[in-house]
Amino acid sequence: MAQEESGFEQLTWEHLTSWAGTKILTRGKSYKQQVSDLRRIHDGGILAWVQGTKRYATLVKRESSGTLSAMCSCPYGWSPCKHSVAVVLAYLDSMKKNQDVPDASKNDRRLKLVSDISSQAGAGVVGEDEDDDDGETGTQITECMEVVLQAVPGSSLSLWDQILWIVDTQLLDEYGLLDGSEKCLARFKDRKAWSLVADTLLQRLENMPGERKKNDFPIGYRREKIMYWAIDENDNDSVIRRYDLAKQARYFDISIRNEVADAVKDSHPDVSLEIWKNMAEEQIRLVKPAAYEVAATYLRKMRDMYKKTHRMAEWTALINGIRAAHKPKRSLMQILDTLEAKRILDT
């Protein structure tokens, strides 16, 4: 029996990535086979059981605005979770196979389970921790660290001490738990505070043991500082000129390249595309799922630029080339899927 339109049919991988994020999406894919007893509810939502550490009731809806919403009885405490992603993917699989999904009864106990969870969330109740759920504990710690980072600006530390604390904590992070630190640092706009931080880090570098050319760090620091001033002043010609000089002399931090690319993308799109391409390739060469996710952020910027400049044929050639060169890397292939504009039903 053909399935009625429910609003899920037009979903693309980009929709799910924007909704859930790459990490949760990847985990959700691995849980698709754990979904059972799919049911449709009267407003077009999808209800199912998902087997994790325990069996969880999960409900996903697509609102009239097109946005997705989810409720799940798992202890994750944030929406969406990997179980909600798995339910969407399992439902779309059933549509591909032209399998009918029955309607849920009004007395389906899963409706009460997710309703109770929704009420608890509104009251600020947090679920119990899971034991070991495919890295979910790490995700929860990451979310907790985001709260810590958000609290830093309200601390009694001076501005430059706040910035330095975040930088030092990030340097000690071996497990990628501080993914939100860049956004937190971006909120600090005081140039004097940043200058003090830069001077402190520079002094640390100068005191590090090992041989190096005299004045290497000060020269690089001064050039980068001038580069940032040019970016702040929207002097793109100067940004490009100084970027070329810094690139030749190798006197610039890797992170500044993305700043340059974002600054000149409208006036010098090809420069931005080259920078993002190089940065994506560097991440892909690390052969780590987390690095592939970083690479995807640069590739998305390239896609948007190619679309803006009406050069989508070049984008297609780029993605096809990456797929051909890295075909055995399954995690990378899955992340590349999220960059495609195709409906999930068509993939």
Image (cartoon, rainbow, N blue to C red):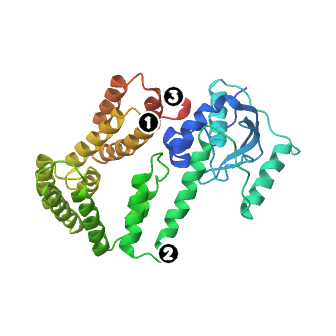
Tell me the residue at 20%/64% (across/down).
225
Report the Cα–Cα distance between label 1 and label 2. 41 Å
Report the Cα–Cα distance between label 2 and label 3. 47 Å
Q: Vertical placement of 49 versus 191: above or below?
A: above
Left or right: where 82 falls relative to 162:
right
Q: In this orientation, which residue lies closer to the viewer: 160 or 125?
A: 160
Q: Which residue is mark 3?
A: 347
- Badges 3 and 1: C-beta atoms under 8 Å apart? yes
Q: Vertical placement of 216 versus 134: above or below?
A: below
Residue 150, horizontal then vertical, whole percent: 51, 66
Q: Which residue is mark 2?
A: 154
Tell me the residue at 27%/46% (across/down).
309
Q: Residues within 10 Å of mark 1 (few under 14, many from 20)?
A: some
Left or right: where 310 falls relative to 98:
left
Residue 166, horizontal then vertical, whole percent: 42, 62
- Is residue 327 shown to the viewer in this render? yes
Dot placed on the residue nearer the N-terminal end, 1 or 2: 2
Left or right: where 147 falls relative to 313:
right
Q: Amino acid at mark 1?
A: Glu
Q: Toward which corner of the image does residue 110 lie, by quadrant?
A: top right
Q: Toward which corner of the image does residue 320 lie, by quadrant?
A: top left
Q: Which residue is mark 1?
A: 340
Q: Vertical placement of 124 versus 73: above or below?
A: below
The secondary structure type at the circle numbered 2 is helix
